Structures are given as C-alpha cells and as structure tokens.
Amino acid sequence: MNGADSLVQTLLDGGVDVCFTNPGTSEMHFVAALDRHHGMRCVLGLQENVVTGAADGYARMLDKPASTLLHTGPGLANGFANLHNAKRAFQPIINIVGDHATYHVQYDSPLTSDIEGIAAPVSGWVRTSKTSEEVAGDAAEAIQFANTAPGNISTLILPSNTAWGEAQGPAPRRAAAVPEAPDADRIRTVAQLLKSGEPVLVLAANRALRVDGLELLSQITDPDTVDLLAQMSNARVERGAGRVAIERVKYPVDQALEQLAKYRHVVLVAAKEPVAFFAYPDKPSRLLPEGCQVHTLVSREQDVIAGLTALVAELGAGATPVRTPKPGLPPLPSRGMDQDIIAAVLANMIPENAIICDESITTGRRFFADTFTSKPHSWLQITGGAIGAGLPLATGAAIACPERPVITLQADGSAMYTLQALWTQAREGSNTTTLIFANRSYKILLGEMANVGVLNPGPKAFDMLELDRPPLDWVALAKGMGVDAGVATDAGELVKQLARGLACEGPYLIEVLV
C-alpha cells in the first residue's frame, strides 16, 4: 500500500465516500488509488470552483464531508470563492491538494506556490504531509476536525512522493468532539428576558433552521412581544406548508433598519449580530437600533437543539402551538413575467421534498417570502457573497440526494462564473432544473451604484454592468454542455417549461427572459 492508498482507505473508513475532483499531474497516484477503492464515488468538475461549490452543496444536505481533489496552489485558488462560501456556511469539507514532491520544491518550478498560505483563509485546519507514513494519520485528523461542530474545512496537502511512497495502511477513525453543552445560567437569563414584556427578537441561524429547531423556536416566541427571524443568508432552511414560517433580515439597509427598529433585545441562536452587507455613505454598519442589547442563547459551536430544548423547558412552553404558514397559494398565473409572477409560479410548482438552490440575487428577492406555503422543501442560499455558487451547490445537492428534485434559481451574470457545473450535471444524470433569470446585466450593481453615492454615471460605467453586447444564449450554452433547455417569455411558457424540467430524467435548463 502506498500513501495514496492509505489516504483513500482512511477517507472511506472515516465516512467520506464522495470525491469532487479536478486532478493534475501531482495527483495521479491519488487518482489511481481512487480507481482501486471501489467505495469512493468520483465526480469530475471542469473548474475547481465547481468542485468546491459542489462539496458545499453535498455537505449542506447530508451533514457530512465530501473530499475535493485539487491541483496544487493554482487549483486551490480557483476553488477559493466557493470555499469562502462554504466556510461562511460552516460546512465540513476535506480538501486534498496535490503538490510537487518534497525534494522538488527547492527548484522553484512553475507551479510552485505557497499552498498553505492560500488554504489558510478558508480552512480551519491545514497540514502538509511530510512522508508517506504520515498521510493516513493526517487524513484521520482532517476528518475529525471537519466533523467538529458546527462543521469545518480541512485542507491536506499531499506532495506527490508522499502519495507514491510506501505506507503501512489506513489510520483508524477518530471521533469528533461532542458539541459543548449550553450554559444553564444563560438559558435562565434568556427565559426571564422573554417573559419581561419588552420587544425581543430571536435571531436564528445554522442548525436552528432545521425542522426540529424551528419547532422549538416557535414555542419560545410570543405574537405580542417576541418575534422570530433568520439571518440574512443561511446555509439551509427547512420550510413550506406545515412547517414553521420564518422570514429573514432584509438585505437593503433602509428596509433592515426599519425591520429591526422596534427591538430592545436580540437573542442570538447560533447566529451573529446583523450588519449591513456593505458599507454605504451616511448609513450605519450595525443594523440594530441604538441601545438594543444583544444576548447569546447558544453559539453555533454548541449543541443548538439542546439549548433550545432547555429554554422551552425553562419557559414551560412545551404546549404552545407550532406557528405554521397560512394555508393557500396564489393563483397560478398564465400571462406576464415579473418577480411576483415568477414567485407565484414557484409557489404552486415547487415539488414535495424539493431542494431549492437560490442565487437569484435581484430577480429573486421576493421568492423566499412568497413561497412559504409551497410544499415542504429545503432552501439553500449563497452564504459568503462570492457569486458563482448556485449551479455548483445544486450539483452537490443532487449527488447527495438523488431521489430529491433540485431547482436552481440562478442569476445570469453569476451563472457564467461556474457554467461548467452544467456539464457535470449532464454527466452524472443529475435531477436538477435550472431557471436562469436573464436580465442581461449585473442588475444588482445598477442599484448598488446609486446606494454608494455614485452620481450621474456615464456610458462607460453602465457598459461595465451590461451583458447584452452580445446577449448570452443560455439554450445554446446549456445544450453545448449536454443539458436540454428551453425559453420562457411569459408565465404560461414558464409553467410548461418548469413542468417539463421537473418531469424529465437528468438536468434541464430554462432561460427566463425578464
């Protein structure tokens, strides 16, 4: 057994059985080892940001890490943006990054780079294996760290000679640390606060936004004094008819300030204090009103469900009815095409148990609120603001849950960052339907230009924000990647196209002209 074999077997023994990959020369022994260990599923991505984003989507749905395989420092750098998103989503990922043989680095050949330096900002654990005998133990430690709450990114750098050198065998699985128990004094303090009658907001994120967490959250809120919101951006929210409805902190600063203005206390449940996405002239960075006090019930590193359960018990609130969405759906439209019409189509047509990957940005700002009463589904968002996440997230989610339909709500400009994910979806026969909202511009930036105080922009400034010279042909682009596609110019066509996409085997793309 060589180092690469010991690594693959250690990954498998540690519960890591999917590898999203874009390999190069330095990784050939690892590639060969993957071929010898049949328990590992290998999913090829044509660009590393597809690979890392797919690993993020996979982890969000299964709460366990996949491996990536990346080629030296530049390959890791290509995947950096979606690793940033994954880190902000607190997802477990194990990056395997090939490197030159340890004795070759001194010659400074063209691909030599500071891989540890590139990995550090998006990894909580980074190590370069020094010998083939160390690889398995390093891998076991990487898995252990990735699985530590709330979920972490480990990066193991594998010099090529440590992959081909002789090794003794795999390392045994190491148990992840048990999440810290919630603080009893803090629970009592928050319980007293919730009963005080003062305006309180409970702000939730991460593990609290699953079905069990939301049901517990609904039992501690009060229609008169205690409200419930989710963070602005979240890795995964379980929602739909029969589940607890939760809105988010709004993205536009003025709307968020108005939304939060009445609160005198905010209780954080695996969340962080709300702040503006960007700095804007003459507007605050902190979104909470002056004098609002912030209290932490439970951090994301702690046992979130145990903390909520203890708070419910402290309040004696177990019999409080679960807050559910109001029944009914909007009429299914047949004409027109705007945000409200698209939202009504989605609300009616989201299938049972679907996974929604949302990178709709400007067009989709209303979709989340307008689909509360759809059939039960999971909603995944871009969490770190690095665009190009939607298509890879959907790719990884479809690998994780092949029995569940995946719908991607995708802005056209950001889709071009990771267009290659469509090819992987076609290759894997993924159960994905992609809606491309083709406004043929970076439309959000047109609004942001005004928000940051740019006055009287000229034709050169506008030209840098438009995607219409030439216009992107999404049907042709999709078919070039092996994905069937169609166009929708009004609601009636959108209904027909979405029904077709959800019914067909394999991926389908709809260019929605807005």
Image: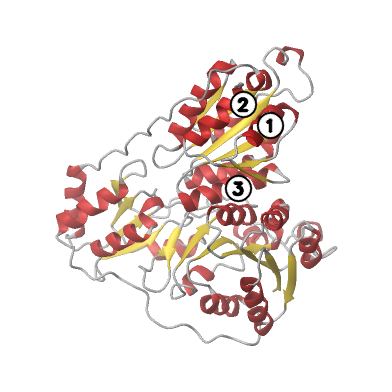
Mark 2 or mark 1, earlier in chain: 2
Instruction: Find residue 4 and name its label.
Output: 2
Quarter occupied by residue 467: bottom right
Mark 2 or 3, nearer chain start: 2
Res. 292 visible in picture: no
Location of residue 198 (image quadrant): bottom left
- 4 relative to 189 in the view: left or right: right
Which residue occupies 43% across, 70% down? 240
The residue type indicated by label 2 comes to Ala
What mark, if any, has residue 32 been given in the picture? 1
Q: Amino acid at mark 1?
A: Ala
**Amino acid under disc 3:** Gly
Element marked by disc 1: helix
Q: Is residue 331 above or below residue 501?
A: below
Query: In front of the other: label 1 or label 3?
Result: 1
**Which label's residue is closer to the chain start, 1 or 3?**
1
386 relative to 245, above or below: above
List x then y, in percent, for residue 5.
60, 27
Side of 512 relative to 293 (left or right): right
